[in-house]
């Protein structure tokens, strides 16, 4: 086998341009496959990190996934609100340790605005039971105070003391501004890698104040209440979008869930964030599988190209193989030689593709996080990824048996004297 | 040990799918040290016979002995090894592996056969020295040794092939019309060199050709028409 290895290397070097291009095709397809797998994995990871220590998410009755999406990820819009009195009633339940009321609906330059209270800074946890950390400044205190997520601050280059104007509505191009009641940046949160980073936080009272002279989603014409005057009104919210609930003991979670489901005053729903996340995965599973299948197909195409290149070269190498036979190589040696070539190109492609992805992730990762909020890690391949890469190598090697076996057949038919 | 290096008895070979046999050789021997010129028309089965002697084809029936060893009794992997240990081949054309230098081409048998390697080292001190001395003896000067096949003339390529067949002193050299791509002048020159080196290496030479004019200088002549009972293009 040893003489064959050096020969295989020299032979491959002799055809380095063709094989090199083929290898690059394999490498690019591996980068794509691995990139999609990593994106999928990191998205799962990131999503799962978004909320921690919250036992129930409560909101008006709708679909659990929808409730999870807007309450935790601030995506989509709530169709209904829940009464403030319901929030208070649930907070009074002896099983409940804390509640965080959430009110959504406004935005700032595409970032969602979340109205909540001081308990948010006390009880909200993410990742592995991490509390929120105020990196600069302090939580909101005055009516028109805003606390920015790390992403909002860095993307829009805000610093403490800056003035910002909120817009009515979550998305769209023609949003009406709450220009008459600007906010001051009093705090910037430390980075969490969760949707918190992309959120502008204000108090529930502030949310009331900026909508006090509004009705049906638009300012009431000829009826403007200046900011200083707004604070004279009762700014207790009438409704909120949803609430997060923490319990004294997890054992009570199902009992409370049932209790909330049969709440008298209005139709409510309580979901376990973990369960809803699983449902979300199931929903996204189809799309993920399609993406993965497409990239798998790209890999298959590149491997087919590799086999085609090795096969096409085989006819020209007929003499070469016969000479090797005359100096003692058996048909199986030729199978080994040809298969080794395909396998080596595949392995080289896998290695180069992985390196390429790591480099791309290192260069583009921060940009992708900034631009799209997706965190892609420039890490060494994990177990799942290694399995995927191993699969590519196995398939590439098996596919390369094809030219190998063809060489075998040719060797038997040609003997030492191919008729070319 | 017998002095018959090639012994064929009652050999019958038919190509797969062919209507009738290609070779039917009742008896044929080559003795040690002979330089045998085997003449045969094109299509008379010369190349087929050489492939049988190389052990890459197996006869349907009959005995085929190389140096007293029955090829048919060997497993195919053993035959592959036996071939490189004891036989050097020179083909009609395209003898060289294009991505190897002339010198590396000559060294090929030593890579696959430890017997040939040891004999080369024994003879010249190292396999490289053995290869270089053979190349010089075959009138290939140092400047050509590191060239690849594509940078050599056909005549030079055939001489490199001869050096490869001879390195490590295999007992048998088999040449299949190695001069057919050369012009007349170079043919004789090549044959003289080849016979001289075979004699120097004590090798038995089996040289096949359709060209009778090349026969002078060989110690014995034979014709396919005499040894093979099948005549013509496998039909007649
Ligand atoms: N690979 C092969 N498959 C089938 N028939 C073959 C093959 N090689 C040679 N033959 C047949 O065997 C006969 C002898 O051919 P060959 O040994 O090449 O003759 P020579 O070398 O004397 O010109 C021819 O009839 C040829 O058609
Ligand atoms: Mg022939």
Image (cartoon, coloured by chain):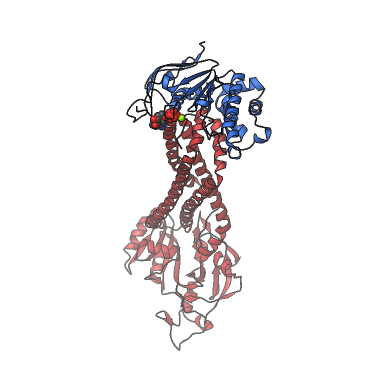
Image point (49%, 61%), residue name: A124
The total number of labels drawn is 0
Q: Quadrant of residue A95?
A: bottom left
Residue at the spot 50% in from the left edge and 63% down from the top edge: A372
Closer to the camera in the image, B119 or A58 = B119
| Residue that appears at 42% across and 63% down | A69
Q: Position of residue A149 (x, y in %)?
A: 54, 66
Q: Residue furthest bottom?
A: A222
Residue A243 seen: no
The answer, for residue A325, to whether it is visible in the render is yes
| Rendered location of residue A22, percent (x, y) | 50, 48
Q: Quadrant of residue B134?
A: top right
- Looking at this view, is A364 or A260 the one in front? A364
Chain identifier of the blue chain: B
Q: Nearer the viewer, residue B97 or A384?
A: B97
Colour displayed for chain A in the image of the structure = red
Decide if residue A257 is on the left or right side of residue A390.
left
In the rendered image of this protein, does residue A78 appear above or below residue A349? below
The residue positioned farthest toward the front in the image shown: B213
**In front: B99, or A215?**
B99
x, y percent for residue B121: 64, 22
User: Taking A183 as reference, is A67 left or right?
Assistant: left
Q: Is residue A64 above or below residue A395?
A: below
Residue A110 in percent (x, y) is at 49, 71
Q: In this rendering, is residue B98 above or below A284?
A: above
């Amino acid at each position: 086998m040893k003489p064959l290895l050096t020969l295989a290397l020299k032979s491959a070097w002799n055809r380095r341009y063709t094989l090199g291009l083929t290898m690059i095709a394999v490498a690019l397809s591996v980068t794509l496959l691995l990139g999609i797998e990593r994106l999928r994995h990191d998205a799962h990871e990131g999503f799962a990190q978004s909320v921690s220590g919250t036992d129930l998410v409560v909101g008006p009755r709708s679909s659990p996934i929808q409730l999870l999406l807007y309450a935790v990820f601030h995506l989509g819009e709530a169709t209904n609100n829940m009464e403030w009195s319901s929030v208070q009633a649930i907070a009074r339940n002896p099983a409940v340790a804390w509640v965080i009321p959430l009110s959504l609906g406004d935005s700032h330059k595409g970032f969602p605005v979340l109205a909540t209270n001081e308990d948010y800074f006390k009880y909200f946890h993410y990742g592995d039971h991490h509390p929120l950390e105020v990196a600069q400044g302090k939580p909101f205190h005055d009516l028109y105070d805003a606390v920015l997520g790390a992403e909002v601050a860095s993307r829009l280059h805000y610093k403490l003391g800056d003035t910002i104007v909120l817009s009515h509505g979550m998305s769209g191009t023609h949003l009406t501004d709450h220009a008459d009641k600007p906010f001051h940046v009093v705090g910037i949160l430390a980075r969490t890698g969760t949707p918190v980073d992309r959120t502008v936080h204000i108090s529930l009272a502030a949310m009331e104040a900026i909508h006090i002279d509004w009705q049906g989603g638009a300012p009431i014409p000829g009826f403007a209440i200046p900011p200083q005057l707004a604070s004279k009104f009762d700014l207790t919210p009438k409704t909120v979008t949803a609430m997060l609930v923490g319990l004294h003991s997890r054992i009570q979670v199902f009992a409370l869930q049932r209790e909330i489901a049969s709440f008298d005053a209005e139709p409510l729903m309580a979901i376990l964030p973990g369960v809803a996340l699983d449902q979300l995965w199931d929903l996204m599973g189809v799309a993920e599988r399609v993406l993965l299948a497409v990239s798998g197909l790209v890999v298959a195409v590149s491997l087919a190209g590799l086999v085609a290149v090795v096969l096409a070269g085989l006819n020209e190498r007929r003499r070469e193989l016969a000479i090797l036979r005359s100096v003692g190589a058996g048909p199986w040696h030729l199978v080994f030689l040809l298969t080794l070539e395909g396998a080596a190109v595949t392995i080289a492609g896998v290695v180069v593709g992985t390196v390429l992805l790591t480099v791309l992730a290192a260069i583009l990762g921060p940009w992708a996080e900034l631009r799209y909020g997706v965190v892609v890690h420039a890490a060494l391949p994990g177990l799942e990824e290694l399995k995927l890469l191993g699969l590519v190598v196995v398939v590439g090697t098996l596919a390369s048996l094809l030219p190998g076996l063809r060489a075998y057949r040719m060797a038997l038919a040609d003997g030492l004297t191919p008729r070319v | 040990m017998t002095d018959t290096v090639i012994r064929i008895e009652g050999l019958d070979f038919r190509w797969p799918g062919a209507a009738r046999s290609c070779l039917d050789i009742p008896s044929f021997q080559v003795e040690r040290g002979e330089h045998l010129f085997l003449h045969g028309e094109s299509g008379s089965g010369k190349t087929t016979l050489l492939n049988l002697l190389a052990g890459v084809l197996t006869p349907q029936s009959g005995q085929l002995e190389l140096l007293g060893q029955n090829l048919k009794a060997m497993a195919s992997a053993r035959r592959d090894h036996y071939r490189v240990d004891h036989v050097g081949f020179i083909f009609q054309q395209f003898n060289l592996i294009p991505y190897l230098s002339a010198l590396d081409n000559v060294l090929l048998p030593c890579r696959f056969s430890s017997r040939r390697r040891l004999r080369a080292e024994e003879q010249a001190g190292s396999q490289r020295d053995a290869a270089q001395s053979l190349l010089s003896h075959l009138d290939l000067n140092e400047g050509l040794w590191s060239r690849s096949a594509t940078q050599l003339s056909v005549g030079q390529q055939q001489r490199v092939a001869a050096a490869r067949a001879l390195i490590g002193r295999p007992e048998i050299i088999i040449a299949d019309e190695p001069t057919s791509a050369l012009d007349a002048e170079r043919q004789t020159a090549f044959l003289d060199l080849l016979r001289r080196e075979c004699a120097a290496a004590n090798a038995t030479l089996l040289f096949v050709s359709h060209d009778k004019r090349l026969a002078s200088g060989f110690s014995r002549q034979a014709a396919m028409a005499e040894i093979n009972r099948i005549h013509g293009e496998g039909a007649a």
